[in-house]
Image (cartoon, rainbow, N blue to C red):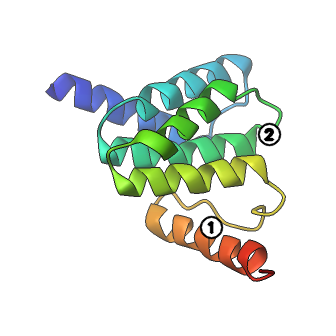
Amino acid sequence: MKKLFFGILFATLFTINLNGQQRTYKMKIIAKKNCVFSLQRNIVGIQASAILTVLQFNRKFPNENIKEIKKILNSLAISSKYPSIRVKAQLASMVLNYPLLFANIKLDSMNRDLTFQKISKLINIRLLSSL
């Protein structure tokens, strides 16, 4: 169990630091696999980190095919047993589907909750204020 936890933690930390890495095909494949692996774990902290990492990955590589990741996010948004993961997955899906709307939001991996609060606030201001 301890090895699995550290393996997942290492995979998540590896994909978070996309800024300093070369943008190679192999790195993108590894990062995507790590995102999928982390999203599929049933551990709140790892899933929450992975959701933000997906957003960072998509921002770095907007033309990359992430259909599989979107499918997992949609599944988490509907069926996760953790309410915080459901909300974060729903917000992340909005960001992935409407990237221009959220382009000015800083994706801060050091303060995930604040990042998701900013996304939620922007949705309230831009989308719900017209009702």
* Residue 41 image position (x, y, % from top left): 35, 31
Q: Nearer the viewer, residue 106 or 101?
A: 101
Label 1 belongs to which residue? 119
Mark 2 surroundings within 10 Å by alpha-carbon count, few (fewer than 14), some (14 through 19), many (20 or more): few
Asked which quadrant contains residue 20, the reply is top right
Q: Is residue 127 left or right of residue 88?
A: right
Q: Amino acid at mark 1?
A: Ile
Q: Position of residue 38 (x, y in %)?
A: 42, 32
Residue found at x 59% / y 57%: 91
Q: Secondary structure at mark 1?
A: helix
Q: Give the position of the N terminus as an image quadrant.
A: top left
Identified at 80% across, 39% down, the residue is 62
Residue 19 visible: no
Residue 85 located left or right of residue 5: right
Which of the pair 58/77 is nearer the observer?
77
Q: Is residue 69 left or right of residue 114?
A: right
Residue receiving disc 2? 62
Across the whole image, how many numbered discs are drawn on residues? 2
Sequence order check, earlier mark of 1 and 2: 2
Locate residue 55, reporting x and y percent: 63, 47
Q: CA distance from mark 1 to mark 2?
A: 18 Å
Residue 33 vertical placement versus 86 (above, below): above
